[in-house]
Image: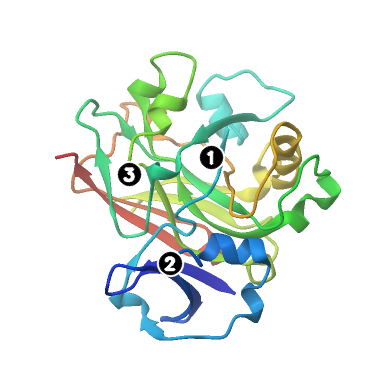
Amino acid sequence: MKYISFLQSDGTPAFGRLEGETIYQLGTGSDDLKSAIGDNNLTSRVNGQSYALAEVSLLPVIPNPDKIFCVGHNYESHRQETNRAATDFPSIFTRFADTLLPHGSDILVPKVSTQLDYEGELAVIIGKGGRYISETDAMGHVAGYACFNDASVRDWQWHTRQFIPGKNFPTTGPFGPYMITPDEAGDLSNVNVTTRLNGKVMQEQPIKDMIFPIATVIAYISNFTELRPGDVIASGTPGGVGAKRTPPVWMKAGDTIEIEIGPMGILSNTIADEA
């Protein structure tokens, strides 16, 4: 199944089941997708009012996650292009929920930088929370998957060895357009993460090439913090980022950036300058 978060015509947030180009509302207000995942009752909900997908304003898949984790340098191609040393453990940093934006919205180039970069990634949405989750059990804790763009303000990322400033500017975390459940997503091993800037392929690599697979990352994170339903893990980007090209390629106003990941669909956003 596919689930999507959106705004009703009166501005009330809602979520629903996406079937083709139609959304069937399943909850509104505080009865959101995160809470439905936590209550483990998504599949038993009855279809409510229907909406045409093209007629609604989307929200990030999970607009209000408690935690967003990002995995750095999780593809060998990206590790090598950044000259990072190999490690025995995944590199984890965090994003804030107010950086998220939906499919179809503008990523804003901050007034304080011109070095806005793309990073196409598979997002993993936690369904069943827990602590000290084993790798064997980890995939049973996944509610679904979505496309993610870990757009990065590189000069701010590189001010120090800490990534967090460059990863937390508002409107730099596109997330969507929908969540697809694991049963419908199927085997992801040969599914590619593909990033296109103005139609040109900039990144393309299969998910199976991750250095630390999804189950390993879930287990690792759950050792140092409790995972909760609706938490998001952006699982890392392949090589080909703009910063490591010669000359560097930065996203600028008027550009269109697309992340495509097999059954997770296409996450498309335009670029605009911050007012």
Residue 6, percent across and down?
Answer: 38, 67
What residue is drawn where x is 57% and y is 20%? 84
Amino acid carrying mark 3 in the image: Thr
Q: Earlier in the sequence, mark 3 or mark 2?
A: 2
**Which numbered dot is residue 238?**
1
How much space separates mark 2 and mark 1, taking CA atoms?
36 Å
**Which numbered dot is residue 171?**
3
> Viewer-proximal residue, 239 or 174?
174
Amino acid carrying mark 2 in the image: Gly
Crowdedness near tag 2: few (<14), some (14–19) or many (≥20) residues, C-alpha within 10 Å: few
What residue is drawn where x is 47% and y is 85%? 48
Residue 232, percent across and down?
Answer: 57, 48
Crowdedness near tag 1: few (<14), some (14–19) or many (≥20) residues, C-alpha within 10 Å: many
Q: For the residues carrying marks 1 and 3, which lies nearer the camera in this image?
A: 3
Query: CB under 8 Å between callouts 3 and 2?
Result: no
How much space separates mark 1 and mark 3, taking CA atoms?
22 Å
Q: Earlier in the sequence, mark 1 or mark 3?
A: 3
